[in-house]
């Protein structure tokens, strides 16, 4: 049934009747306009049929002015009822279980789907959380290729034994309302200054990005040696003919004592069979923890005064010891230590004292430190960065480029536009940072 009105806010009579087979309306119901006034219904009937379409509009109400549909029924007690469609609360799960059997889809083994395989749903939610898509898979199970190699397995076992020897953690049930930090194995090939491989290195690192500030870590700042201090020590050693010795602290971060309560999951491949559901309560620092570097630095700087060293006033990573006529300088950069003195006996004494407190490796004479290659000659020492530059060229896929003894054309113009954008901006920024590090040594770079 259809009724026609002149205008939404007008009480004027109908001018024309746009419907097929109209008939006068006999009744008492009215149509409420937007201004609240009631409009009488004059005629009823069906709308005009459309011969080009199979759609037949019946029982609709039209606005005379705009021709838009106002509603499909008459008012009820002065209101237009709008019933909501019934909706069944549904949660869709992509899969109720995950099998460890091999899949044909390789991305499934590496991580979760980026697009869940849900069918297209026509239903729409009208209230929050009415439609919920749940992902109950979690990270897909998998095993890295390195773990299957026996050499990496031995490296992992050596790292785990070192952690147990240092008493890095003890197993406890996870207390309530505590943050659990994950961990992972990181694999690296150790090489000498000439590029030859020396050993396989596996390191257990914590997933420090999941730590919560104020809960399991606080202050994270730790000083490192200044580049100018390194230049000064090398220049002093050359001028006075002092010997340079290098020490490496094994698992340096494991010596740091944690002040906060940090709980970590058990390492992959080394879960205790007696307590598989326990977690590691860290007693000492671990690599990649937010406070790891600071904890190790505090541990070292608290011990170094016990063997006669004092901290330099110009650099907190430079330590000086005056033992009679002997002067010993010690540089600390994370876990690398440089010792220099004109007395070989004084250097040997310091190495003995440090080895009693920390597990250290005596690397002998200094040959490579912070990208600097040290070569000893009759006239003194020679410092180059040949290996570091070769590594930068290899990283930029320019290893086959030939060196040039002169700079490129000084009037070469660099255009801001005209080149395609980099496919990997992060890689480009890393190269720029490596070149900037070269300039810290006083080199002048010219990049055509």
Image: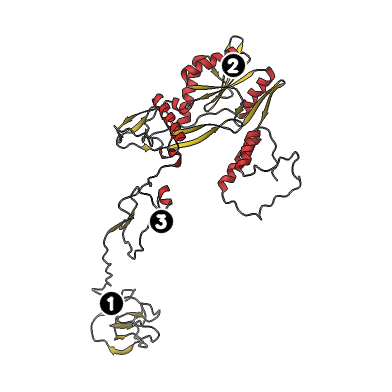
Discs 2, 3 touching: Cβ within 8 Å: no
- Mark 1 or 2: the one toward you: 2
User: Residue drawn 54% across and 13% down?
Assistant: 349
User: Residue drawn 52% across and 27% down?
Assistant: 335
User: Label 2, on which residue?
Assistant: 328
Q: In this orientation, which residue lies closer to the viewer: 140 or 237? A: 140
Q: In this orientation, which residue lies closer to the viewer: 65 or 162? A: 162
In the shown orientation, is residue 202 left or right of residue 116? right
Of the image marks 2 and 3, the number of the one nearer the N terminus: 3
Which disc is residue 286 wearing? none
User: Label 1, on which residue?
Assistant: 73
Q: In this orientation, which residue lies closer to the viewer: 140 or 231? A: 140
Discs 3, 1 touching: Cβ within 8 Å: no
Is residue 54 in view?
yes
Q: Is residue 158 above or below residue 74?
A: above
Q: Is residue 112 above or below residue 368?
A: below
Of the image marks 1 and 2, the number of the one nearer the N terminus: 1
**Quadrant (top left, top right, bottom left, bottom right) of the N terminus:** bottom left
Q: Is residue 118 above or below residue 28?
A: above
Image spot of residue 54 (x, y percent):
36, 83
């Amino acid at each position: 049934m259809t009724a026609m009105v002149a205008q939404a806010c007008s009480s004027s009579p109908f001018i024309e009747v746009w419907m097929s087979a109209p008939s006068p309306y006999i009744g008492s119901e009215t149509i409420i306009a937007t201004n609240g006034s009631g409009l009488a219904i004059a005629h009823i009937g069906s709308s005009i049929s459309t011969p080009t379409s199979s759609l037949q509009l019946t029982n609709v109400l039209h606005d005379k002015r705009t021709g838009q549909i106002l509603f499909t029924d008459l008012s009820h007690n002065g209101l237009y009822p709008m019933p909501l469609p019934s909706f069944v609360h549904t949660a869709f799960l992509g899969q109720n279980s995950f099998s460890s059997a091999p899949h044909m889809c390789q991305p499934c083994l590496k991580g979760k789907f980026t697009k869940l395989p849900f069918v297209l749903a026509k239903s729409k939610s009208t209230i929050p959380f009415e439609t919920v898509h749940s992902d109950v898979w979690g990270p897909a199970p998998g095993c890295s290729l390195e773990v299957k190699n026996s050499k990496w397995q031995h490296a992992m076992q050596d790292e785990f034994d070192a952690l147990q020897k240092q008493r890095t953690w003890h197993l406890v049930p996870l207390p309530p309302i505590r943050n659990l930090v994950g961990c992972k194995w990181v694999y690296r090939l150790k090489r000498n200054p000439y590029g030859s491989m020396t050993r396989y290195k596996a390191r257990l690192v914590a997933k420090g990005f999941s730590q919560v500030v104020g809960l399991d870590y606080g202050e994270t700042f730790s000083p490192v040696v200044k580049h100018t201090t390194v230049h000064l020590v090398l220049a002093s050693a050359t001028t006075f003919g002092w010997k340079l010795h290098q020490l490496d602290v094994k698992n340096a971060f494991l010596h740091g004592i944690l002040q906060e309560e940090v709980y970590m999951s058990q390492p992959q491949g080394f879960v205790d069979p007696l307590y598989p559901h326990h977690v590691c309560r860290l007693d000492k620092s671990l690599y990649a923890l937010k406070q790891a570097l600071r904890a190790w630095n505090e541990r070292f700087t608290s011990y170094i005064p016990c063997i006669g060293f004092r901290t330099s006033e110009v650099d907190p990573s430079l330590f000086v010891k005056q033992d009679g006529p002997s002067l010993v300088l010690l540089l600390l950069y994370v876990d690398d230590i440089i010792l220099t003195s004109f007395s070989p006996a004084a250097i040997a004494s310091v190495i003995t004292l440090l080895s009693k407190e920390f597990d250290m490796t005596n690397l002998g004479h200094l040959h490579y430190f912070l990208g600097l290659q040290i070569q000893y000659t009759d006239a003194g020492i020679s410092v180059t960065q040949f290996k570091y530059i070769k590594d930068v060229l290899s990283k930029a896929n320019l290893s086959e480029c030939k060196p040039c003894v002169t700079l490129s054309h000084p009037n070469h113009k660099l255009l801001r536009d005209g080149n395609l954008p980099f496919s990997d901006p992060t890689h480009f920024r890393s190269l720029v940072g490596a070149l900037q590090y070269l300039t810290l040594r006083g080199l002048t770079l010219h990049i055509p």
